[in-house]
Image (cartoon, rainbow, N blue to C red):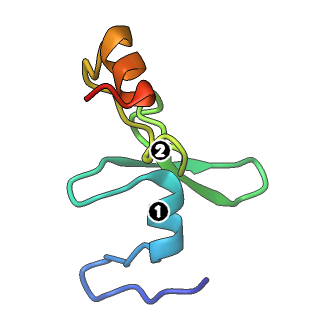
Amino acid sequence: MATTVTSKGQVTIPKPVRDLLGLAAGSAVEFRLTPEGQVLLARADAAARPRSRFARLRGAAGPGMSTDEIMALTRGEN
């Protein structure tokens, strides 16, 4: 993926990279230089890993029905 540097030295991080790193407006990023002369982009907050696609779908159940209520429902005793 290629991008262009603006006159102010700014670049747009491509959406697939932002999604992969879990970056949003205001996120801090870090540039790391490798011995081979490459530049790596990483989240500055290593603890804030992007959530997996499954974690976003995970929810929490409420108190729900009691066992007696479920049994009555399955027996047609409503």
What percent of the width, then of the height, locates residue 59?
37, 36
Asked if 16 appears above or below 31 in the picture, the reply is below
Q: Residues within 10 Å of mark 1 (few under 14, many from 20)?
A: few
Report if the CB atoms under discs 2 and 1 are less than 8 Å apart.
yes
Q: Amino acid at mark 1?
A: Asp
The residue identified by callout 1 is: 19
Q: Pointer 2: residues within 10 angstroms few (<14), some, or many (20+)? A: some
Spatial CA distance of label 2 from label 1 is 8 Å
Which secondary structure, mark 2?
loop
User: Up-down: is 32 above or below 73?
Assistant: below
Point out the tag, 2 or 1, that comes first from the N-terminus: 1
Q: Residue at x 37, y 56 (%)?
A: 23
Q: Out of 50 and 60, give the one closest to the viewer.
A: 60
Viewer-closest of 63 and 49: 63
Q: From the viewer's side, name the closer residue of 56 and 66.
A: 66
Q: Residue at x 43, y 72 (%)?
A: 13
- Left or right of 9 on screen, residue 13: right
Q: Which residue is mark 2?
A: 50
Quick one: SS at disc 1? helix
The amino acid type of the residue labelled 2 equals Pro
Residue at 45%, 75% in the rendered image: 15
Percent from the top left, x then y, of residue 68?
A: 34, 10
Location of residue 21 in the rendering, given as x and y in whole percent from the top left corner: 49, 53
User: Could you tell me which residue is drawn at 28 percent across and 23 percent down?
Assistant: 64
